[in-house]
Image (cartoon, rainbow, N blue to C red):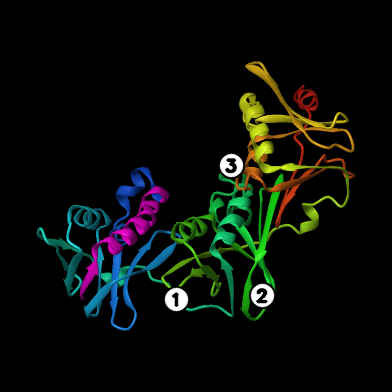
Amino acid sequence: MKISANREALAKVVNKLSSVVEDCYGIYGGEKKKKLGAARSTLSYLKLEALHNQGVFVCAANKYVFCRHLVNDCRVDREGACLLSPEKISVVLAESTYERIEIESEESTEVRLVTDAAEFKDMTHDVYKFPTPKLDNGEFTCTVAAKDLLRQIGLTKFAAARGGQVKSAEYRFHATAGIEFTVGQKTLKLTATNGSHAATAEASAKLEGALPKAPHVLAAQTLDVMCRQAGDGDIAFSPTGGMSHFFTDSWRVVGPLVEGKFPSDKAFWPEKTAGKASTTAGPLRLALSQAAVFGSGSLHRLTLNFTNGNKLIISACEVAGRSRVELPIEVKKEFAADYDARCLLGSVEALAPDDVVTILYGDKENQKRLVLSADGYRYVIVALADKDADKKGAA
């Protein structure tokens, strides 16, 4: 393989994909990192591909995700591939001031980098051992604007289950540890839940091919890597063979689909609520943040009290101190309940300050569920158990 690459363009891609390699270390961690053997020797490298008709690509992989990114402004003199150490190539690219860098490898054993200042040589591993999935698309492709998809993920990901909330050693592959993608003819809906709260976000999308019969659940690791690559324009989603594919003209991210399915929507949303109020996201987020200063223990309990005085009182009362914040809001029915402060803050974190938020409260199932909704977004949370009831149960 022999190429001539624009140094700044190559450095930009290498910096983006180095985090994927770092995730490889983070997943194993501790002493296991020292015992990876052959698996570590390939996953700790970046793969450089050169194809006459397609260009130059940098690939990175960890235990869960594969990413392939096109490098702009490259010339391919000889096709081939090699593995590069992300640490060493980053240093070479950072120290050079030359506009272009020459990279050449022979038989996948040694790679040579030539810049204006010096020539560097490095040993590489067998490029054929680098894990590379099939890059074919599935039966359908759903295309959505990048800004809309990133907003959807920001509005829902916080509601997905964490390790301690899923009774499974492999919680990364538990259905509720991911985000459910439901593709329609003209829409894409994302849903996340941990059982006590749920969030959905919907955006316009374009479907090509057959309408999928069932939703797909995607792992958080895949979405994290995809979000790092995303820029302007559109992003296409096309699952196939148990793998999810996100791609544009310049990059592709591939990760495993999560087995299992989410509860139906009826399990989340109350059929009828007693009260309704509305405000904007900015003041609501500020009021929640100020009141959450004295959140209770691991639950960070906040009391929401909708009063007839047309205001919402958000408060916390603990041994360490008390907080009370009043938010002017039109209230049609009195209501009070305790909720997890972290969940409430997460529900409005990704909303724009001027987004209008509608609050529904007091469902007939007596779970005191609270529903927040904005443009294309809905969130529901179940009230925490009463403190006095907890004390009686403990006794």
26, 154: nearer the viewer: 154
- Residue 57 found in image quarter: bottom left
Residue indicated by mark 2: 212
Prevailing SS of the magenta stretch: helix
Which disc is residue 164 wearing? 3
Marks 2/3: CA–CA distance: 32 Å
- Residue 291 found in image quarter: top right
Tag in front: 3 or 1? 1
Circles 3 and 1: CB distance less than 8 Å? no
Residue at image point 24% right, 58% down: 85
Q: Residues within 10 Å of mark 3 (few under 14, many from 20)?
A: few
Which residue is situated farthest in the front direction here?
354
Marks 1/2: CA–CA distance: 20 Å
x and y percentages locating residue 280 in the rendered image: 71, 43
Q: What residue type is disc 3 on? A: Gly
Q: In this view, does 2 lie to the left or right of 49?
A: left
Residue indicated by mark 1: 135
x and y percentages locating residue 290 in the rendered image: 63, 28
Q: Give the range drawn in magenta.
A: 1-27
24 part of magenta stretch? yes
Q: What residue type is disc 2 on? A: Pro
x and y percentages locating residue 381 in the rendered image: 74, 43
- Residue 110 found in image quarter: bottom left
Q: What residue type is disc 1 on? A: Leu
Q: Is residue 35 above or below residue 61?
A: above
Asked if residue 174 can be seen in this view, the reply is no
Which image quarter holds the C terminus?
Answer: top right
